[in-house]
């Protein structure tokens, strides 16, 4: 008897289709984060020659270049995985790790110098202390989260599902300053750009959780634990530490 030859079943086709869908999500997220950074720092960094903006020290310029390089590298790394060039992805991994160290060093330096630079530009320290404290402590919380996510991602580099979520979370933790600058645009006049930036950053974390629910039917432990830690760190830093006398005294001392 002639046996009927059946077409490939869903169990054969679906893994590749599912893999491509997962790749598209991470590429889209990485591309979106890069776009946020490019838009946020267009006036003050990339096209500053065409706008009337204050001078920036070399350390801030270097910080901007390093941060941009991080997001470009993150986008390239996710794209390489999406097109299944994990061999190149692995070789470039340590370059990205080195960029991460540079991001941490330059960001810490810029954060510590934020209040003195604002005072040098004419800001009244006491009158601006509450807002400066929020910005400084939010940046410290973001850097803490970035450091933890990146170091854990490197440690778990042989566990792709955890590694890629940690790398995405580490990048999300860095975009709040760019978002805050976007929300200074005239279309958002009258709204608190710091609050909008915080909410938008948390929505990016929720996007990862929603992706998990759609693709896995449950939230991945890294998304749950990492997202909860990041949100908790940001809320504690902004609404507790930054508003405390000790937190403000620290910022006052920097200025």
Image: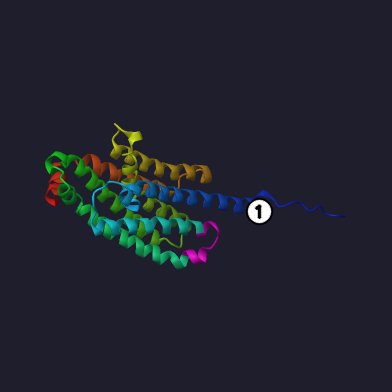
Q: Does residue 247 appear left or right of residue 58 in this picture?
A: left
Q: Predominant secondary structure in magenta?
A: helix
Question: Residue drawn at (29%, 53%), measured in percent from left and top?
Answer: 143
- Left-right relation of 141 to 211: left
Numbered disc 1: secondary structure: helix
In the rendered image, the vertical position of residue 163 relative to residue 133, given as above or below: below
- Residue ID at (41%, 49%): 33
Colouring method of the image: rainbow
**Quadrant position of the N terminus in the picture:** bottom right
Q: Nearer the viewer, residue 133 or 158?
A: 133
Tell me, yes or no, whether the highlighted magenta stretch contains residue 111: no
Q: Callout 1 environment at 10 Å: few (<14), some (14 to 19), or many (20+)?
A: few
Q: Position of residue 225 (x, y in %)?
A: 37, 48
Q: Percent position (x, y) of residue 154?
A: 39, 62
Residue bounds of the magenta highlight: 80-89
**Is residue 101 positioned above or below 140 on the image?**
below
Q: Which residue position is annotated with label 1? A: 12
Pick whichever, 242 or 2, lies toward us.
242
Of residues 95 and 227, the one nearer the viewer is 95
């Amino acid at each position: 008897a002639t046996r009927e030859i059946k077409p490939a079943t869903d169990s054969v086709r679906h893994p590749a289709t599912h893999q491509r869908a997962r790749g598209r999500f991470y590429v889209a997220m990485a591309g979106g984060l890069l776009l946020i950074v490019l838009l946020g720092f267009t006036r003050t960094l990339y096209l500053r020659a065409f706008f009337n903006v204050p001078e920036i020290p070399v350390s801030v310029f270097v910080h901007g270049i390093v941060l941009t390089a991080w997001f470009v590298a993150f986008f390239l790394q996710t794209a390489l995985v999406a097109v299944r060039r994990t061999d190149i992805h692995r070789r470039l991994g340590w370059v990205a790790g080195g960029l991460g160290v540079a991001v941490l060093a330059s960001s810490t330096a810029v954060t510590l110098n934020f209040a003195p630079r604002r005072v040098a530009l004419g800001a009244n320290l006491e009158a601006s202390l509450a807002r400066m404290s929020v910005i400084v402590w939010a940046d410290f919380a973001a850097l803490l989260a970035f450091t933890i996510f990146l170091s854990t991602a490197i440690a778990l580099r042989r566990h792709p599902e955890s590694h890629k979520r940690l790398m995405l979370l580490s990048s999300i933790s860095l975009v709040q300053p760019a978002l805050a600058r976007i929300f200074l645009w005239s279309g958002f006049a009258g709204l608190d750009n710091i609050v909008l930036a915080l909410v938008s950053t948390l929505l990016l974390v929720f996007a990862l959780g929603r992706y998990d629910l759609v693709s896995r039917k449950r939230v991945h432990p890294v998304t749950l634990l990492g997202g909860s830690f990041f949100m908790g760190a940001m809320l504690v830093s902004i609404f507790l530490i930054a508003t405390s006398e000790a937190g403000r005294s620290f910022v006052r001392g920097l200025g």
